[in-house]
Amino acid sequence: MADSVASSDDSFYHFTPADEFSLQITHIFKIIDRHWKKLMSISMNHVRVRRPSDEDDHSRQEEEIKRAFYEREKIMLQCMEVLLEAIREGTGFLAFLSVLVLHLRADNPVSLAFMHHVFEKASLPAIDTMDHASEMIISKLNKRPGRLQRMISLLCGRYREAAKKELVRKQLINHWVIDNFMRPIVDPMAVKTRQNAAIVWALLAKKYAGEMACHIWTEEVGDILIKSLANPQEDVLVRLFCLVALERFALTAYCKDRIYHHDLNIHELLLAIIAECNDVLQRIHLLNTGKNQTPTQLDVPLAGPLREEWAKYIQLKSCCQWAVDHTFADPQVVIHSWDLSRLRMIMNPYDATSGLKMTDNGLMLRNDLNHFESVRGTSCVRKGKWYYEVVILTNGIIQIGWASHNSKFSPDEGHAVGDDINSFAFDTFRSAVWVAGKCLYPVSILDTRCAIGDVVGSLLDLDNGRCTYYVNGKLMQMTVEFRCIPGINEHYFGPNGFGLFPAISVHGHQQVRVNFGDEPWIYKPHVNYPYWGISQAGVLDPAYRKKVKYWVYKRGKTRFSNAYCPTGGPILRPPSIIDVVPSHQTPPVSDTSNVDDDNFDDIQSPQSNDGDDDNLCTICYAEPANVRLLPCKHQEIGVSCAAMIKKCHLCRHKITGRCILKTL
């Protein structure tokens, strides 16, 4: 009897290796979780101070700022050291993955930046550790929230917000979808966990592409990602990041082969999702305007849940278009070719960094890497007044501005538009203007962080040496005066200077849509002087259009596609009309309502007469395209055809006037 009791006690205190492994992960998980939360809370707690009233207050304020930044950096470095030390072992690495799946904030670029930084500094994990990585992530996906966590969510109103969004989503998807797929999503924490899991898988597949990615990939992982992507009832951002994860796994040949052999054909699935997005976007346009017509990419709904869903479906659609023509493409067929026949200017695919995703005829830009990706437009200007606008589709770091051809974009070093003497940009997230790598308007003074659906406009006045920015048509107090910046003046960017290109940099998982003026403006700047859309500064000649179509057909893999030209060759660009500016007789772009229907005024225009097909009417191809329609300013139409139409042949706006253009 005593022997049996003793054996019973021994078995009670005996731990199996699996139990010891679990206890180690639990202990390290608590350490990593505490320091990760501390790191995030400090990094997102920006130092904001009041304006100084006198010189003494100003000096005291500067000392307080320096002391506060020093203390923040000290604590952040300590937290980083603890994290890096903890994940050196396999148990710490798996515990860190668990923390990311549960607590990563995908809507905050600071959180994503620190996640990538930790993985960059971490040592290479063992293969045995990678074998358990996906198992650890899936265990967190299957874990249900506890009672205390559900009570906190109820008190914080998370379920109410999720219910409101769900009501909007029910209006956007067909009712049969709810019956045939899983029940509507109402748990925001579960949605966050699934989204974070996809982000972590994408990061691991990209960083450890090759043999180690094969240890991360399992049939269950592929089944989760593909079925989540295929499920219309799933949250749109979860589907989006599942697609990104599949693209990253496709970098490894074995994983890509397993994706192709899944029960759901990935190519057909992507085409079906694109059709689904088109239907949902049309329904959003109907709910927003009451008009049952095909919307454009610039039809931004009113602020609210409808706009958020609109931005998500725009992102999902463009990512599917990119994937179906690049990652999972048919080598002989391009599904979404570019139509440049009605455009005078695009973002130059031959002048972009390699990781940028460009769709919608070079006007939709997205970046899914962990650093800045940048691009310049096809045309530059040296004098005059020029304007373009950008629709913000995400809440992250985006820098919108201008750059000369000497501005060098370096993703590996984190250099973007505004980080050297040859460029300047407005930062939509940090509420700042960057000039020559310095913050001209810091966050502590102005707080104008842009949100989804906001429209940022940039009005460049090279005649007076300044650039102003607008958000939703409202002038921001963030003017760049060239004469006030050391090393930059009106002569540097003047008629004898290098010229300025529209330039944009987008950080990880950010997306924008550009309008150079070939489409109607969403918001026009309220100024009392004439200005031109930047598209009027250039022309896409037939030779360049042929090169762009070749770039699209070759999926960007051409000898011209590297923006930095390591072989020393020049960057491929179309000809720019940079020395022609609006004359005083040209009516302002912002005011053309007083033009008569049958009035054809002679005005000067930056048009060349090369005698090629680009100068013929796009309707009849029998007469010169020498008429500009008002108020939309669209061209490429002849006199006879312009006289027969009442609405613009491009944007369908009512024509209030027609102007005959003089060729130069």
Image (cartoon, rainbow, N blue to C red):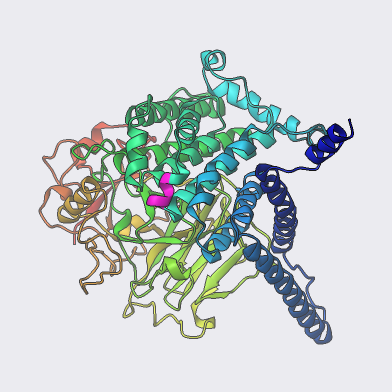
Name the residue: 66% across, 48% down: 21
Residue 87, horizontal then vertical, whole percent:
61, 59
Residue 368 in view:
yes
Name the residue: 48% across, 38% down: 242
Residue 108 falls left or right of residue 266:
right
Residue 298 falls in which quadrant of the image? top left
Residue 67 versus residue 297: which sits nearer the camera?
Answer: 67
Q: Main secondary structure of the magenta part?
A: helix
Residue 576, horizontal then vertical, whole percent:
25, 64
Residue 30, horizontal then vertical, whole percent:
75, 52
Residue 212 inside the magenta-drawn segment: yes
Residue 287, horizontal then vertical, whole percent:
55, 25
Residue 543 inside the magenta-drawn segment: no
How many numbered badges does the structure rendering display? 0
Residue 40 falls left or right of residue 432:
right
In which quadrant of the rendered image does the N terminus lie? Answer: top right
Provide the residue span drawn in magenta.
209-214
Residue 177 falls left or right of residue 140:
left
Name the residue: 77% across, 79% down: 67
Q: Is residue 488 above or below residue 315?
A: below
Residue 72 versus residue 313: which sits nearer the camera?
Answer: 72
Residue 298 in view:
no
Residue 663 falls in which quadrant of the image? bottom left
Residue 26 versus residue 443: which sits nearer the camera?
Answer: 26
Q: Is residue 625 above or below residue 349?
A: above
In which quadrant of the rendered image does the C terminus lie? Answer: bottom left
